[in-house]
Image: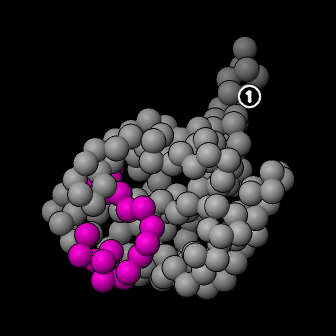
Amino acid sequence: MQRFFVFVAFSLVTGVFGQSGAFKKIPLAEVKNLQGKTVSSVEMVQNGDAPVILSFWATWCKPCVTELNAIKEVYEQWQEETGVKLVAVSIDDPRNAARVKPFVHGQMWEYEIYIDENSDLRRAMNVNNIPHTFLLSGSGEVLWQHTGYIPGDEDKLYQLVLKVAKGESIK
């Protein structure tokens, strides 16, 4: 019996904290778009057969903004080649949520932007540090995740996006 509990605990830890986890789907939670409309997380990441990049960020997080700006430079090309969709979820709290829309417009990001004011999706996906980037299948399966940002991470991410778009495994 003790071995069973050890196995279950190990499975949970590796599934939640591992770099890959194709068995996991995005959890159901509600977020708001920039117009204030409530959208389900499952609906937010639907993209047919094409991959989805889900990025948790905040207006006050310099590495987050640097990463999203780096991707902005190549995003159109990525979309043309792979059909990828980037969904950026702000974790700014209700006091700062009003700053998100003007901030996004100032950055000229063409991504789908949502606000997780109550941190429901953030908690459900175990996001503790930002930027926290997930790569999902078009049906919402979590395939890979990464925290932090250093220049060049976007190139590594794109290599994974290419593999997913081709139907290859990214173990």
| Residue at position x 51%, y 48% in the image | 45
Residue 8, percent from left and from top: 68, 27
Magenta stretch: includes residue 45: no
Tell me, yes or no, if residue 120 can be seen here.
Answer: no
Residue at the extreme top of the image, as rendered: 1
In the shown orientation, is residue 119 left or right of residue 15?
A: left
Residue 100, percent from left and from top: 26, 69
Q: Residue under label 1, please give it.
A: 7
Asked which quadrant contains residue 61, the reply is bottom left
| Residue at position x 45%, y 67% in the image | 111
Residue at the extreme front of the image, as rendered: 80
Secondary structure of residue under mark 1: helix
Amino acid type at circle 1 is Phe
Residue 23, percent from left and from top: 69, 36
Chosen colour scheme: one colour
Residue 112, percent from left and from top: 42, 61
Tell me, yes or no, if residue 71 can be seen here.
Answer: yes
**Which corner quadrant holds the N terminus?**
top right
Asked if residue 68 is positioned above or below residue 26 in the image, the reply reads: below
Asked which quadrant contains residue 9, the reply is top right
Nearest to the observer: residue 77 or residue 88: 77
Asked if residue 49 is positioned above or below residue 154 in the image, the reply reads: above
Nearest to the observer: residue 16 or residue 89: 89
* Label 1 crowd (10 A; few <14 / some 14-19 / many >=20): few
Magenta stretch: give its range: 101-120
Asked which quadrant contains residue 57, the reply is bottom left
Asked if residue 52 is positioned above or below residue 44 in the image, the reply reads: below
| Residue at position x 18%, y 66% in the image | 98
| Residue at position x 63%, y 38% in the image | 24
In the shown orientation, is residue 170 left or right of residue 82?
A: right
Magenta stretch: includes residue 105: yes
